[in-house]
Image: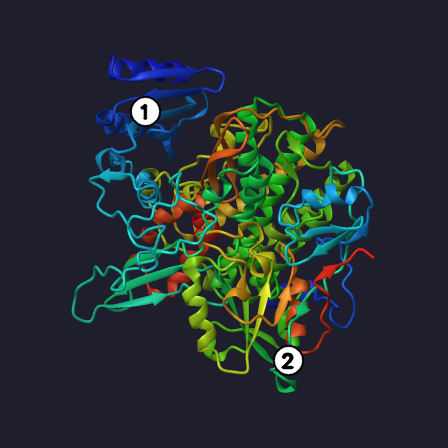
């Protein structure tokens, strides 16, 4: 079904009650509906018409709320933005997580309630999400327009009696708290594992210890300064997020990126994916205490960091992106050298995979743990290697190609089992595909400019990228001074962390660090 | 056995640092050097998003605590600043309370106080065979009770303040605090807002400062060596003369 057919279906479904505007060039159907229709419409899109939920974007206008629910399909089906509006004083919306059973919207609604104060009727768990109740009182709405982000909030009335929710009520039941500081070198996250003995019956993750309010900080900034934030909020995948931001800005300005810059962007994005996957593989080896494999994977990650540093000056690819292309050209010869390094790394990754596959002590730890069933992956709209290991072979480079990915040959690896081992195999397979793409990109490099002028105008657009951890969506609105009026980043760690508890429950305590490592989640990317 | 053989075949990869210099390409992004630029100095200083560059009488000086590696002083300008290679960047504030007994054995507690992931990832690299910090007697510990050095990354977010303070208070004395990365030193691009301040020093007494966004593993290693008195500290600014 293409986007025109989808438009007909939507209009036929609720004649006269929805307004559907199709931007055929961008393949975006903008559907405006009343609040009472929202859940029904989202349910049809998600459950019957094969659309995936990408994210919820809340915007506060001068006198009205606008909520934008973004869905997308494969290729020609394009994008559907469902818009509902309401006066600022009347901020109650239906919860599509509950009413339409689009579970993927659950955390989006919680975040919007916490930061904007909009309410979602029927949602069972609002509050204490981004803003921890033991640090902030209810009623603080930092994403609202009047809230001054630069000044410290003087009136702080944290809940003194805040206690985490306990679900398991049984004699002998206890809670194992982990974090926010735990383990050797780990990001700050808090977990609570509830049990009556060996197995984790229920797990609960408390996030946003690292919340830097990046979306708020971006407001009022010039595009180039907001780009610094986009690159730096989750710097292990800095290039992917910077790229998504730049693509949104370029879509607003209708700017085209010169061919050489497009090919270099592909090359660098795949270099970053390869490096991030090598790092994820290292962490999995480390979590299973397989010492030699840990060391060998560690060498590979460092080799790629060095190759990135030698090629671009920065080991995490900072400072390269600019709206309209790249801030600096890279020598074709240097790209070939980096490619040679990547080829060597992938050959050694292959050797590592062959040895891991016959190491029974390793397989015992990682097989059949942390299982995410395919139906869960679909219900939660999971993304990236986690989704693809659960038989959801979706990849934005294929589903909604950008940067000319449609002209590159590559496979989208997937596995059936959805366990830790399946996720590891997907990481190895994707590393090989990234190298394939890098080889084609290096061969396709032609001399030419790397940056086109970008005439910034007021407007809003979505940029999307298949980041190493999965799909990321960046919504940017510029005002008439070309300053950022709204920035919203939906990240793969935010999407996938929503399902992590399902992977951790039913398994033994000692599996927990292994399961966590196979999900390759980033708290920095989730918290923003 | 196969693992042992494959490990042995890899050979020794460990860096010569600190006994010798490490010159492999890509181990460091470098830092900008101050310079006399005349009339261009003012425009260049204005380009710096975190005010790491200051100018006076045509000279640019660089405050390394604030540099976030945006390369605006190096790219797209008629007179770019030169960037110095190297990685011995850590500066020291005050004396060394740990003293000689700790010089060859410290336990380091790493706390993420809102890091973007890059500094933490560079700390992680210290345990890979290239850097292998165990050979220097540096070990990571998960508990404050065993820790001699507190290594903090990130700008200290509001939600991490209480935890960070508790962790510091739970460490036995003598103890030292090493702040790693531009965010931990100045707040970086996140300073200053209702959820982030201007770094670790607002909350804890910082002894060693390691600049960089992120500092490469060798710079963090240098910071730990400075913390135990085994390396000389570096200046945290470049004046341009």
- Secondary element under disc 1, as helix, strand or loop, is loop
Mark 1 neighbour class, 10 Å CA radius: few under 14, some 14 to 19, many 20 or more: some
Query: Crowding at label 2, few (<14), some or many (≥20) Cα neighbours within 10 Å?
Result: some
Q: Residue at x 58, y 78 (%)?
A: B106
Could you tell me which residue is drawn at 49 percent across and 39 percent down? Answer: A219
Q: Which image quarter: residue A23?
A: top left
Horizontal placement of B7 versus B152: left or right?
right
Q: Residue at x 53, y 54 (%)?
A: B117
Mark nearest the camera among 1 and 2 is 2
- Of the pair B30 and A487, the residue shown nearer to us: A487
Q: Secondary structure at mark 2?
A: loop
Residue at the extreme bottom: B101
**Residue B1 shows in the view:** no
Is residue A182 rendered to the left or right of residue A177?
Answer: right
Q: Position of residue A317 (x, y in %)?
A: 64, 45
Q: Is residue A171 above or below residue A327?
A: below
The residue carrying mark 2 is: B96
* Callout 1 and callout 2 share a chain: no
Subunit that carries the residue with mark 1: A
Q: Please give the chain letter of the residue carrying mark 2.
A: B
- Whether A106 is drawn above or below A168: the answer is above
């Amino acid at each position: 079904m293409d986007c025109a057919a989808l438009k007909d279906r939507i209009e036929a479904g609720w004649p006269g009650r929805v307004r559907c505007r199709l931007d055929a060039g961008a393949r975006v159907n903008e559907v405006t509906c009343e609040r009472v229709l929202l859940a029904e419409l989202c349910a049809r899109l998600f459950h019957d018409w094969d659309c995936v939920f990408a994210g919820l974007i809340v915007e506060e206008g001068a006198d009205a709320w606008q909520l934008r629910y973004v869905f997308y399909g494969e290729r020609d089906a394009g994008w559907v933005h469902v818009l509902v509006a309401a006066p600022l004083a009347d901020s109650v919306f239906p919860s599509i997580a509950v009413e339409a059973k689009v579970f993927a919207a659950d955390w989006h609604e919680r975040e919007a309630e916490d930061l904007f104060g909009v309410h979602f009727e029927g949602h069972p768990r609002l509050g204490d999400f981004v803003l921890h109740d033991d640090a902030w009182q209810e009623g603080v709405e930092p994403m609202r327009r009047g809230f001054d982000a630069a000044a410290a909030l003087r009136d702080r009335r944290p809940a003194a009696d805040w206690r985490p929710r306990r679900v398991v009520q049984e004699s002998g039941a206890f809670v194992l708290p982990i974090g926010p500081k735990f383990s050797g070198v780990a990001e700050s996250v808090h977990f609570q594992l509830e049990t009556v003995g060996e197995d984790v019956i229920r797990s609960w993750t408390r996030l946003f210890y690292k919340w830097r309010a990046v979306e708020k900080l971006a407001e009022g900034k010039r595009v180039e300064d907001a780009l610094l934030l986009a690159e730096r909020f989750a710097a292990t995948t800095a290039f992917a997020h910077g790229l998504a931001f730049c693509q949104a800005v370029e879509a607003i300005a209708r700017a085209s990126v010169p061919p050489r810059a497009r090919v270099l962007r592909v090359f660098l994005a795949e270099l970053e994916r390869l490096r991030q996957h090598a790092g994820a593989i290292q962490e999995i080896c480390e979590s299973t205490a397989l010492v030699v494999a840990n060391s060998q994977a560690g060498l590979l990650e460092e080799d790629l960091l060095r190759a990135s540093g030698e090629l671009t000056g920065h080991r995490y690819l900072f400072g390269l992106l600019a709206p309209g292309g790249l801030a600096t050209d890279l020598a074709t010869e240097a790209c070939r050298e980096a490619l040679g390094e990547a080829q060597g790394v992938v050959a050694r990754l292959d050797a590592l995979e062959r040895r891991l596959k016959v190491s029974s002590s390793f397989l015992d730890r990682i097989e059949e743990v942390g299982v995410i069933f395919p139906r869960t992956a679909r219900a939660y709209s999971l993304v990236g290697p986690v989704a693809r290991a659960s038989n959801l072979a979706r990849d934005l480079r294929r589903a909604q190609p950008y940067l000319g990915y449609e002209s590159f040959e590559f496979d989208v690896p997937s596995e059936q089992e959805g366990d830790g081992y399946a996720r590891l195999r997907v990481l190895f397979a994707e590393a090989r595909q990234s190298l394939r793409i890098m080889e084609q990109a290096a061969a396709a490099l032609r001399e030419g400019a790397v940056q086109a002028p970008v005439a910034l105008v007021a407007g809003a657009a979505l940029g999307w990228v298949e980041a190493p951890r999965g799909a990321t969506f960046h919504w940017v609105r510029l005002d008439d001074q070309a300053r950022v009026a709204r920035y919203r980043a939906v990240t793969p760690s935010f999407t996938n962390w929503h399902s992590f508890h399902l992977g951790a429950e039913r398994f033994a305590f000692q599996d927990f660090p292994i399961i966590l490592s196979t999900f390759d989640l980033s708290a920095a990317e989730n918290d923003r | 056995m196969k693992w042992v053989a494959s490990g042995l075949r890899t050979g020794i990869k460990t860096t010569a640092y600190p006994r010798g210099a490490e010159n492999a390409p890509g181990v460091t992004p470098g830092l900008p050097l101050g310079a006399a630029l005349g009339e261009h100095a003012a425009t260049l200083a204005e380009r710096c998003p975190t005010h790491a560059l200051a100018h006076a009488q045509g000279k640019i000086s660089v405050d390394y605590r604030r540099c976030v590696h945006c390369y605006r002083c190096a790219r797209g300008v008629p007179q770019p600043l030169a960037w110095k290679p190297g990685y011995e960047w850590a500066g020291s504030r005050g004396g060394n309370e740990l003293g000689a007994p700790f010089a060859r054995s410290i336990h380091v507690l790493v706390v993420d106080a809102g890091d973007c992931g890059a500094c933490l990832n560079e700390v992680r690299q210290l345990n890979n065979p290239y850097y292998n910090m165990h050979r220097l007697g540096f070990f990571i510990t998960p508990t404050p009770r065993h820790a001699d050095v507190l290594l903090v990354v990130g700008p200290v977010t509001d939600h991490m303040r209480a935890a960070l303070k508790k962790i510091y208070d739970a460490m036995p004395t003598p103890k030292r605090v090493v702040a790693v990365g531009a965010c931990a030193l100045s707040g970086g691009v996140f300073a200053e807002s209702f959820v982030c301040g201007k770094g670790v020093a607002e909350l804890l007494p910082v002894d060693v400062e390691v600049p960089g966004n992120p500092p490469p593993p060798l710079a963090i290693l240098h910071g730990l060596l400075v913390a135990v008195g085994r390396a000389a500290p570096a200046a945290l600014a470049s004046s341009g003369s």
